[in-house]
Image: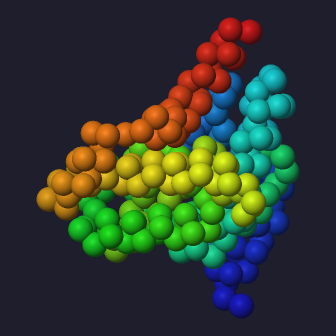
Amino acid sequence: MTQNNADMRALARLSRSELHAHARHYFKTGGRTEPEVALVVYGGAQAILKDYARTPGWFGRLIAPILIWREYSALVRLAGLEGVPSLHRRLDARGLLMEYLPARPWPSADAPDAAYARLRTLVDAMHRRGIAHCDLRAAGNMLVDDQGRPYIVDFVARVQRGARWNLPWNWLYRQFVRADESALAKLRVRYAPHLATAADRQTLSTQGPLERIARAIGENTRSLLRYFVRSR
């Protein structure tokens, strides 16, 4: 076993307080409806901690466990898929420890043309596993590294394909798959217009109602939750 592997095994066993003690940087510092998201460094190992444990009130007690479960279940279903962060550990109902991805959000990276094709391959593979992301229009949920390798993160808004007999739900799932594909079309039109096709532009101009619902799931869930928090 290499030293980095040993460090990673040790990091994955740290308690919540120890993980926070080894946090090198906080991407999010948390709030009434937001988790703390930290880069944890232990020796030569790095990981991402997503933690609602210090989120106060009813949101932390009732809503946060649902959000953690949604992301956890998606990562389990997508385990081993290159481009999706590996799950190191579920701390409890309010925390996850995940693979650190040395990549930048798509809008701030100069992604090469090949990255767009790789991203489409990744999204197709995700759909074959039965997960529609539903928040790919937030371009920050798509990352790319210096070698042009794409990654997808933040599966809180995901929709999962149902059992074979559940035809109505699976029809709905396919509409959310279309919403993911529409988000990729938008990405090409906005950041690589030379790669965008006429079909891409047509897709963006003819969104169906369920595609708009999928967009709303990703864009409005947190703002609605914040509204209800403020209203109490």
How many marks do you count on the picture? 0
Task: Confirm whether residue 133 shows in the render.
Answer: no
Q: How is the image coloured?
A: rainbow
Residue at 70%, 75% (x, y): give it.
7
Quadrant (top left, top right, bottom left, bottom right) of the N terminus? bottom right
Horizontal side of residue 159 vs 19, given as left or right: left
* Image location of residue 39, percent across then percent down: 59, 54
Q: Residue furthest bottom?
A: 1
Residue at 67%, 48% (x, y): give it.
168
Q: Quadrant of residue 36?
A: top right
Horizontal side of residue 122 vs 148, given as left or right: right
Residue at 59%, 29% (x, y): give it.
222
Compared with 164, 30 (above or below) is: above
Compared with 18, 205 (above or below) is: above
* Image location of residue 215, percent across then percent down: 47, 37
Task: Confirm whether residue 166 shows in the render.
Answer: yes
Residue at 37%, 40% (x, y): give it.
207
Quadrant (top left, top right, bottom left, bottom right) of the C terminus? top right
Nearest to the observer: residue 36 or residue 216 = 216
* Image location of residue 133, percent across then percent down: 55, 52
Q: Residue furthest top?
A: 231
Horizontal side of residue 113 vs 159, given as left or right: left
* Image location of residue 111, percent across then percent down: 28, 62
Compared with 216, 111 (above or below) is: below
Horizontal side of residue 152 vs 145, given as left or right: right
Q: Quadrant of residue 80?
A: bottom right
